Amino acid sequence: MNRQKILSNFFLLLLIATVLSFSYNQYRSYKDEEAVKVYQELVQEEKDQGKAPSTVQPTNVSEEIIEDESVLLNNKPITISDNKNIPLLNEIEDYTGWIKIDNSKIDYPVVKAKDNDFYLEHNYKKEKSDAGAIFMDRRNLGNRYDKHTIIYGHNMKEGTMFKDLNKYLTEEFYQTNNLISFEDLYNDYQYKVISAYYISANDYTIPFELDEEIINNLLDQSIHESDYEYNSEDRFLTLATCNYILNNGRMIVHGVLIK
């Protein structure tokens, strides 16, 4: 058998294999669509009869199929639902979450840019603004994989943005409003305040990586006592704004995730 014939047979086999693979994928896609269609019809039938749709068991649905209805994936029921943040994502290009502290004016969307400068002079709509926006540190991912989330905001004279962080200077506010709510794109969290203090930024930088020694130092700086004890599995939140007690001062509040 000469070289040309060998090559001809090789390409013929390759063509046959490609056709068979394409045909199999088409067949599997067809079966998946049929399975989901049958399942949805069964769900509707169960609903019409007043039964819970969870009693319906779809069959032969591959992992590639994702529908709006509840289906079985690896023999476990799952439900695909709309993300509640979609309207905010459509309105705010860099939206990454929402932060709220009770009995304060802090109730704002949180954005994140490629640097930590842009939102110092732009609002969340990316319009020029002296008040800026409440924004997350550029190093954060903005999801549950962040060990330490840092969020910044200006201290505005009219009481907006992060000015109310300075309320944590009083023992009463620290004790009665020690929970911070934060929602990212997928989950809702609550952080308990464990440290609050003001400091000059001339000789201070917020540490991004945290360990037991650093956390203990942050607790020591607090003007209020805390019973928190370090756990390496804990996740932390830091809020920062300006404070004018000191020259180039900062007001810093640290919290630990509780749920």
Image (spheres, helix red, strand yellow):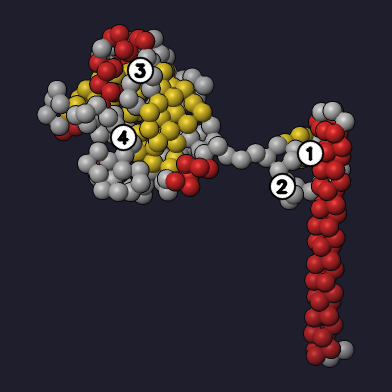
- Identified at 86% across, 46% down, the residue is 38
Decide which of tag 4 and tag 2 comes sooner along the chain.
Answer: 2
Decide which of tag 3 and tag 2 comes sooner along the chain.
Answer: 2
Location of mark 1 (residue): 72
Q: Position of residue 57 (x, y in %)?
A: 86, 36
In the displayed structure image, the side of residue 35 where residue 152 appears, left or right: left
* Amino acid type assigned to the residue bearing label 2 in the image: Ile
Q: Mark 4: which secondary structure?
A: strand
Location of mark 2 (residue): 66
Q: Position of residue 249 (x, y in %)?
A: 17, 28
Res. 241 visible in picture: no
Q: Position of residue 50 (x, y in %)?
A: 84, 28
Q: Are marks 4 and 1 in contact (CB under 8 Å)?
A: no
Decide which of tag 4 and tag 1 comes sooner along the chain.
Answer: 1
Q: Is residue 87 above or below residue 183?
A: below
Q: Give the quarter of the image for residue 46.
A: top right
Res. 67 visible in picture: yes
Q: Position of residue 124 (x, y in %)?
A: 35, 43
In the displayed structure image, the side of residue 239 where residue 27 appears, left or right: right
Location of mark 4 (residue): 152
- Identified at 80% across, 67% down, the residue is 22
Tell me the distance, in whole angstroms, between the alpha carbons under discs 2 and 1: 10 Å
Q: Is residue 1 above or below residue 10?
A: below
Location of mark 3 (residue): 103
* Amino acid type assigned to the residue bearing label 4 in the image: Tyr
